[in-house]
Image (spheres, rainbow, N blue to C red):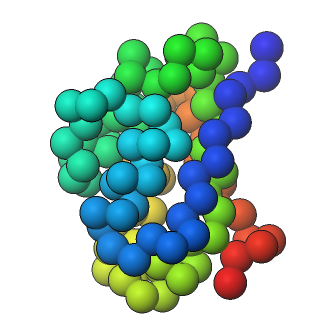
Amino acid sequence: MTELVVTLDLTGVTDKADLMDRCAEALRLPGWFGRNWDALADSLTDCTVWPEEAAERGMRIVVRNWRPYAGARPAEWRTAEEVFSEAVDRTPGLTVLLALGGSS
């Protein structure tokens, strides 16, 4: 079985609140998702809140169109990268890829 591929498209994201909303939508996180860095880290490392099909197969998150946000909010983006990286290191079956093509 191949892992579930989820596209996290950051087109139009201008701040942390937008990023958290986009993560909640793309990852189909529960309504109680706290929309902060700790809640994102917890959600990425807890496969019980992943989309049902990902819990068994694993999940690959492809982050697209991230460069404008990274350029506009470099400190926030560094934190996001740390959260993604630490989650991947701690979670078997989780991969996060930053797409370079199609980003501006």
| Foreground residue among 35 and 94 | 35
Q: Give x and y (percent) for residue 100.
A: 74, 71
Q: Quadrant of residue 98?
A: bottom right
Viewport quadrant of the N terminus:
top right
Please tell me whether residue 32 is drawn above or below residue 72 in the rendered image.
above
Q: Give x and y (percent) for residue 49.
A: 38, 22
Viewport quadrant of the C terminus:
bottom right
Please tell me whether residue 45 is drawn above or below residue 70 in the rendered image.
above
* Residue at x 44% of width, y 53% of height: 22
Q: Quadrant of residue 56?
A: top right
User: Is any atom of residue 90 visible in this view?
Assistant: no
* Residue at x 47% of width, y 78% of height: 69
Left or right of 81? Residue 3 is right
Q: How many marks?
A: 0
Left or right of 100? Residue 86 is left
Left or right of 82? Residue 68 is right
| Foreground residue among 46 and 65 | 65
User: Is any atom of residue 79 visible in this view?
Assistant: yes
Furthest residue toward bottom: 72
* Residue at x 21% of width, y 31% of height: 32
Please tell me whether residue 39 is drawn above or below residue 65 in the rendered image.
above
Q: Give x and y (percent) for residue 78.
A: 39, 72
Q: Give x and y (percent) for residue 12.
A: 51, 73
